[in-house]
Image (cartoon, rainbow, N blue to C red):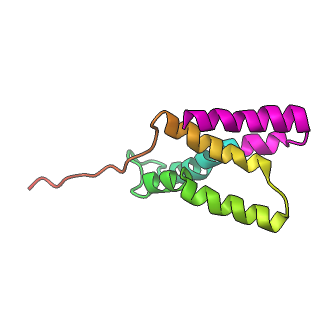
Amino acid sequence: MLLITIILLIVLFYWRQFVVKDLNLISTVFWIIFPDLASFIPIGLAMRGAKEWPRWGSGLYNFLHTFLVWIPIFAIWNIFSGAVQWPILGWAGHITADRSVGYYLRATTKGKAD
């Protein structure tokens, strides 16, 4: 995954930004942080005053940090726009960067004391 992360960074920030010169940098940075924004904002809102994450928190986080979600969105967006949307590769880079260091969230389970 680290190799894929490096390749995505080269494609986005070297090839598209400096060689082709058509990368929207603000949009790319948005898509890089999008998975965390889309998961941590609802989790944070649900946690106001609580001491523990909501049960669905890790599921939402992991849902937005998987290629099973990214690939269809990337494909559909490219088909409807008629061109490759390069900034959305930032989302893929975020996923691969997290996976290259083994980062994902697990749901906490509380066992009942019988």
Q: Nearer the viewer, residue 50 or 110?
A: 110
Q: Which residues are magenta?
A: 1-30
Residue for point 73% across, 50% down: 88
Answer left or right for 101 relative to 71: left
Which quarter of the picture shows residue 18?
Answer: top right
Which residue does the image show at 80% across and 31% down from the upper left? 14
**Rendering coords of residue 49 (x, y %):** 45, 47
Does 16 appear in magenta?
yes
As drawn, is 65 to the left or to the right of 85?
A: left
Q: Which is more toward the observer, 49 or 44?
A: 44
Does 114 appear above or below 16?
A: below
Hey, which residue is sitting farthest right in the picture?
21
Asked which quadrant contains residue 94, the reply is top right
Q: Which quarter shows the C terminus?
A: bottom left
Q: Is residue 64 above or below residue 11?
A: below
Placement of the N terminus among the 4 image quadrants: top right
The x and y percentages for residue 97 are 57, 36
In the image, what residue occupies the spot 49% across and 49% down? 48
Task: Give the quarter of the image for residue 30.
Answer: top right
Q: Residue furthest left?
A: 114
Query: Residue 19: x, y in percent?
Result: 89, 33
Residue 38 in the image: x percent, y percent? 61, 52
Determine if the magenta segment contains residue 32: no
15 relative to 112 in the view: left or right: right
Magenta stretch: dominant secondary structure? helix
Q: Residue at x 57, y 54 (%)?
A: 67
